[in-house]
Image (cartoon, rainbow, N blue to C red):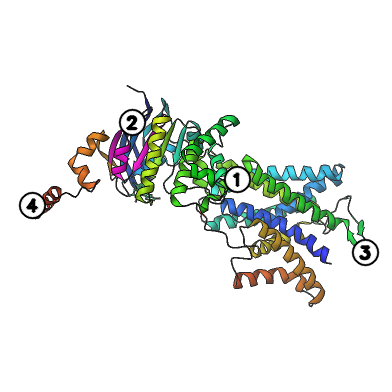
């Protein structure tokens, strides 16, 4: 069995008095792709921000490669080897695509390694090579997502955190981006923690999954088994075959009586 | 007269540049910018007139001293206030301006001082045109400074990281950029630029705590005219204010020269608050 690279233990994170994460634990093994599924507002982004040091947990710990990293500054966490692809892409709008990528490699001093990685990234996302000298703000949403992923790769991280890469993209683009995410995991052995609302794509792509509801993990299993579960199909995959629907109506009726 | 206006305008432009750099990065307006320029001029005065070093030592010494001063100012006083309402930062910088003036008066006296520069009282002639060297020094100095800053912000890793931190602070953190240190460095650069402005201005106006503070307010008008947030805008705004002042002094009744900058500021705020270069795209924070 592969080694655990990231271990989140029982974290509680607050926005002022509001408890957004209510004791979450999860583990990611080296080379694995783990997903956290949850509806809007479930706390997915907050978990990632707690890992990368943007938010400090009130309780609990985050351990990366055997070292506690909670409550540190985000630039320090990043230098430990965790790259964060934030929700909403967050590219630098007035910098060129190439400059954005070089910012991803800000902490590195090995120039030839950086050049190699630039070529690697352009290999995965040829459209970024075509647009290398354009301002990132002028890219389409899908291209910006590709840039955000590439920028994170440029730090040559030990693991990546991906926050809803499917957000606001067309199904075709979502398919394309998840294809590349899977390839990065398989070909580069990149360890990934992916949080998503798009359960369908995430479960098809990742190995292991957690289901998050209002700040708590309510279910955990391999993605293959999660996909088989009835309530996952019903609430996250939107399976609409007659049987499931009929049952749901029946349940509601029973509740009302 | 035209040259005079451009030269003084360059000074406004350099101070306005400091306003804009700090504003773009931290969304704070540093109203002490003019007073920092005064301190820079006094630093040079100390090095040249009191310690007896030559002009160039004074210039670069003043830049260095003020850069360190700006860095420390941000790291020690401003950073704790970040996250407080804008108002708190504005009050803090205005207060700092007062303190700087008082302290400068206590150290160097309130009487105007001056130091020798290689340009004082000399002229250069280009065919029929005769230009005072102190003006020429300001214009060339500003151009060189802009070139250096431009190359720094576009060609160096740290410079691009400063742009990145201004554009998206959170993402800059995710890239491992030490954003706090970058903001301190931006204050250092602004203070260094103010020092250059102060030293170049010294042959034109005597250094005293009172007058140099006014330059800050006029430079603020220049920054607003330029669209507050645009670096070329700050320079163009500065030069325009410098010219307006000169021509107002010549063609309008007495008193207009001194107030014309404020009139321009009011007009811009009423007619086109976004300034001349104010198409800055929406900034994400
Ligand atoms: N800046 C904030 N201030 C207060 N509450 C917030 C803030 N950001 C998120 N929350 C709350 O925290 C909870 C989790 O949010 P988030 O982690 O963004 O969810 P998700 O990424 O799963 O959509 C939500 O209930 C949300 O309302
Ligand atoms: Mg989210």
Quadrant of the image for the C terminus of chain A? Answer: bottom left
Whole-angstrom CA distance, mark 3 to mark 1, is 45 Å
Residue B162 bears which disc, if any?
1
Residue that extends furthest to the left in the rendered view of this protein: A257
Above or below, B29 against A38 in this view is: below
User: What's the magenta region?
Assistant: A189-211
Subunit ID for the residue under disc 2: A
Q: Is residue B55 left or right of residue B96?
A: right
Q: Secondary structure at mark 4?
A: helix
Give x and y (percent) for residue B103. Answer: 72, 51
Residue linked to disc 3: B128
Which label belongs to residue A68?
none
Residue B131 forms part of the magenta stretch: no
Which residue bears the numbered disc 4?
A254
Of residues B15 and A37, which is closer to you in this image?
A: A37
Rendered position, A252 above or below A9: below
Q: Do the residues bearing badges 3 and 1 touch, measured as CB atoms within 8 Å?
A: no
Q: What residue would you read off at disc 2? A: A27
Residue B57 falls in image quadrant: top right
Kindly report which numbered mark, 3 or 1, lies closer to the viewer in this rendering: 3
Rounded to the nearest angstrom, the CA distance separating label 2 from label 1 is: 36 Å
Residue drawn at x 37%, y 39% is: A179
- Quick check: B194 above or below A110? below
From the image, state whether disc 3 or disc 4 is nearer to you: 3
* Closer-to-camera residue (A225/A219): A225
Which one is in front, B95 or B71? B71
| Disc 1 chain ID | B
Q: Are marks 1 and 4 in contact (CB under 8 Å)?
A: no
Q: Chain of mark 4?
A: A
Residue depicted at x 40% and y 40%:
A162
Q: Residues within 10 Å of mark 3 (few under 14, many from 20)?
A: few
- State the CA–CA distance, disc 3 to disc 4: 100 Å
């Amino acid at each position: 069995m592969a080694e655990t690279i990231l271990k989140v233990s029982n974290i509680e994170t607050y926005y002022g008095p509001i408890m957004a994460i209510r004791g979450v634990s999860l583990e990611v093994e080296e080379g694995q792709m783990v997903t956290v599924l949850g509806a809007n507002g479930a706390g997915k982004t907050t978990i990632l921000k707690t890992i990368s040091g943007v938010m400090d947990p009130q309780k609990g710990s985050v351990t990366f490669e055997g070292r506690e990293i909670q409550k540190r500054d985000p630039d320090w966490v990043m230098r430990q080897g965790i790259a964060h692809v934030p929700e909403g892409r967050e590219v630098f709008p007035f910098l060129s695509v190439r400059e954005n990528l070089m910012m991803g490699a800000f902490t590195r001093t090995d120039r030839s390694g950086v050049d190699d990685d630039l070529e690697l990234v352009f290999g995965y996302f040829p459209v970024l090579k075509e647009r290398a000298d354009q301002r990132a703000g002028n890219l389409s949403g899908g291209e910006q997502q590709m840039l955000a992923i590439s920028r994170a790769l440029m730090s040559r991280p030990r693991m990546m955190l991906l926050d809803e890469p499917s957000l606001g993209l067309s199904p075709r683009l979502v398919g394309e981006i998840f294809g590349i995410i899977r390839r990065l995991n398989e070909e580069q052995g990149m360890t990934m923690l992916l949080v998503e609302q798009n359960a369908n794509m995430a479960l098809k792509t990742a190995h292991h999954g957690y289901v998050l509801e209002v700040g708590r993990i309510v279910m955990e299993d391999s993605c293959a088994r999660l996909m088989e579960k009835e309530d996952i199909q019903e609430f996250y995959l939107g399976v609409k075959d007659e049987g499931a629907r009929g049952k749901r109506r029946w349940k509601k009726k029973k509740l009302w009586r | 007269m035209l040259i005079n206006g451009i030269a003084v305008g360059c000074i406004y432009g350099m101070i306005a540049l400091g306003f804009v750099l700090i504003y773009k990065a931290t969304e704070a307006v540093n109203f002490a910018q003019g007073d920092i320029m005064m301190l820079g001029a006094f630093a040079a005065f100390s090095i040249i007139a009191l310690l007896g070093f030559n002009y160039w030592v004074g210039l670069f010494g003043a830049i260095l001293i003020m850069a360190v001063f700006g860095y420390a100012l941000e790291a020690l006083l401003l950073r704790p206030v970040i996250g407080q309402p804008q108002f708190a930062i504005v009050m803090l910088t205005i207060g700092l301006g007062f303190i700087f003036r008082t302290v400068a008066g206590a150290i160097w006296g309130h009487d105007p001082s001056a130091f020798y520069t290689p340009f004082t009282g000399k002229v250069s002639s280009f065919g029929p045109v005769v230009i005072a060297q102190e003006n020429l020094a300001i214009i060339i100095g500003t151009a060189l400074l802009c070139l250096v800053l431009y190359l720094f912000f576009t060609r160096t890793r740290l410079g691009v990281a400063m742009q990145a931190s201004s554009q998206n602070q959170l993402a800059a953190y995710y890239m491992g950029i030490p954003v706090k240190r970058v903001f301190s460095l931006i204050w250092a650069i602004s203070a260094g630029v103010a020092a250059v402005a102060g030293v170049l201005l010294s042959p034109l106006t005597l250094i005293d705590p009172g007058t140099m503070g006014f330059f800050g307010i006029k430079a603020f008008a220049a920054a607003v005219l330029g669209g507050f947030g645009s670096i070329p805008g700050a320079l163009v705004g500065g030069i325009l204010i410098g010219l307006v002042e000169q021509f107002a002094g010549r063609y309008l009744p007495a008193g207009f020269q001194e107030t014309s900058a404020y009139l321009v500021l009011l007009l811009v705020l009423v007619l086109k608050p976004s300034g001349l270069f104010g198409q800055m795209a929406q900034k994400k924070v």
